[in-house]
Amino acid sequence: MMNKNLIKTVARRVAAAAACILITMNAAAQLKQFSLEDLNFGGTNYHNMIPEYRNITWWGDELVLRNAEECKLVNKANGKETTLFTEAQLNAWAKTNEDSKILNLGWAQFPYAGKSLVLIANKQERMLIDFKKKAVVWRQASKGQEFADWNNASKAVAYVSDHNLYVMDAEGKTTQLSTDGSREIVYGQAVHRNEFASMKGTFWSPDGTKLAFNRMDQSMVADYPQVNTFEREATYEPDKYPMCGMTSHKVTIGVYDMKTGKTVYLKAGDPTDRYFTNLAWAPDGKKVYMFELNRDQNDCRLTAYDAETGEKTGELYREVDEKYVEPLNPIVFLPWDKSQFIMQSRQDGYNHLYLCTLGMHGSRMASNTESLEVEQLTEGKWEVLSVLGFNSKTKSIIYKSNEASPIQQNVYSVSVANKKRTRIDEGGKGWHEGSTISASGRYLLDNYQEPTVPRRIVAIDTQTGKSHCILNAKDPWKEKGYNIPEYSCGKLKAADGTTDLYWRMVKPVNFDPNKKYPTVVYVYGGPHAHNVDARWHYSSRSWETYMAQKGYLLFILDNRGSEHRGKDFEQATFRQLGQEEMKDQMKGVEYLKSLPYVDQDRMGVHGWSFGGFMTISLMTNYPDVFKVGVAGGPVIDWKWYEVMYGERYMDTPESNPEGYAKTSLLNKAKDLKGKLQIITGMNDPTVVPQNCLMFLNACSEAGTQPDFFAYPGEGHNMMGHKSVHLHERITQYFEDYLK
């Protein structure tokens, strides 16, 4: 029998614990609750809820802070800011009126190191303004110019108007380079549906006197019947959409010489079923280099062409792979040696830097032309993510990689002479995506996040190691008193039993480990994307926070097939998209089921695009696990997806019928058991609505009952305030059927 003192002690402790719980509950109750207007990028209060940012650019080796109404010089050593000019001053110096007023300095450029010139544009023209002399020193018309590409060396601009390509020189003389431009004959724009890192269609030589440009003939590509329903009588507004196994467009590369006024086309041969990408110029402007890829995307060649004649001068490098090769980066010449350039390749299994030296010893394909000596500069089971620039004094390359961790991005330099790698960012943790290098390569503007660091911006002298903090952003959620969930990260083994996979978890607010919570797996899973990294909150999406506030546990896993983990990791899904990815996601589910606070009877799944495909795949392949799903913009059958992406990972429907049949969700419509909502933009040009509609048809034939919602006029993603509506709809579906 307890003695009286023990009873009193126990009673006091129970009372104290109850009081603590009450205080905690009261404190939590006093904290603000998020709305989607706070969390979603389309929300009215979203701009107040993101970490503070500084719009800083380089002016040679100097830092300039760009605000809407003024630009300031930032001292790299102490952070002191000195006003260079204001919006009002520029308007006064340029003598603008209401129609020509300069409205925002956020896009101001400083194209010439050591010169007090700012490039600015209004609705009518672009100007170079000398902010020391307080005068406009040069003007150029800009009204009506689409896809404008301005060159700072020649001050010439290439642009598209009414489908045709034009060049305007520094004096305003305009030359029309094409006359047959149309929706079927496209000039000066990105090609291959933005695959192979094709993001633009004009490429200036270093001195700005020659222009290489894309010409895409898509007259042979079938029209996909998009419809504009916002007219009283709906109108037909088709997209050019080459589906897997069908006829694709043809691309040729033109070169215009401003000095001669002539245009030649590179003599690359028949462009049928070939991809031309990642154009680069020789330092002297005499040659154009590009990667050429066959339609199977398993044979990639670096070729060179004479810019004056269009003649092929040699094949410098060739890379083949039994699955696929994907060139994503143009070659970049060393600023101190015109005979050497940097090439990125996965030839050893991971994306690395290679030092390439041009010679005159005869190539593999043509005699008495350029040859290439190739030397690997970086190596290891990690990937180079991007090249930032060069330091000519130390003869080193500045780049970003995930060498430190698969979920980190850090900044390094590598010596061309001895291959020594040196990390040059601050701290060596986190995700340094916003970091940039100065013109000389000596100074690093290190802009990064960590899981508990919203944003930090530091100016670093890489030569001395001295640094100064420009911004140490506060947590806007804590500052404003919101009730914030717990974000965590970990890893588990993939279905192959050896590969590490990284996950993120968002626990419900006011988490109680003794409770069981409904759990939603958010999934993407496809190539060229990842969900988990060492950014703020482990890169958690704001919707996850919204759901955590409503009492859900969120779980996100990067499966094999996602990016930046090497060739084998990515190619594990080849010819069978969704299959290995599902196995890995179910390893995540196994982990979730081991946690006492996860309600195994209330598990849902949500994803968009490839994630929509994964959502329906998981719902129909594991119907007893996932009770509720929301699939946005889902691919249903890969035969309805575009040529470049679809055939890279699946081959053609003719060459891989088993793979297409296995991965098609039409065959899985009969296996749907839980509640599934499908959402699409009714004018989606990326995953065409045919995917959703045919799955609905398959379900009607199979007797299964999905729900469906479409956004008229919207594309692959809901933009503006409709994104708020979308995420409330997604939330309500889980609230209705999972809680």
Image (cartoon, grey):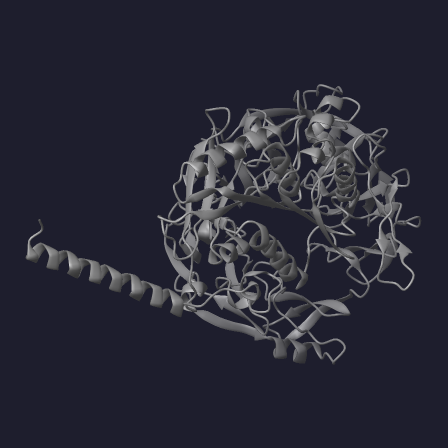
Q: Position of residue 120 (x, y in %)?
A: 67, 67
In the drawing, does residue 242 fall left or right of residue 14? right
**Horizontal arrangement in the rendering, residue 484 relative to residue 659 (left or right):** left
Question: Which of the 4 image quadrants contains residue 224?
Answer: top right
**Image coords of residue 190 (percent x, y):** 76, 46
Tell which of 458 and 450 is nearer to you.
450
Camera-side residue of 392 and 734: 734
Residue extending farthest front? 1
Residue 281, horizontal then vertical, whole percent: 70, 40
Does residue 584 appear anywhere in the picture?
yes
Q: Which residue is drawn at 61% across and 66% down?
A: 106
Judging depth in this view, the residue of 110 and 163 nearest the camera is 163
- Image quadrant assignment for residue 47: bottom right
The quadrant where residue 235 appears: bottom right
Residue 302 in view of the camera = no
Identify the residue shown where x is 72% and y is 38%: 636
Q: Position of residue 245 (x, y in %)?
A: 81, 30
Total labels drawn: 0
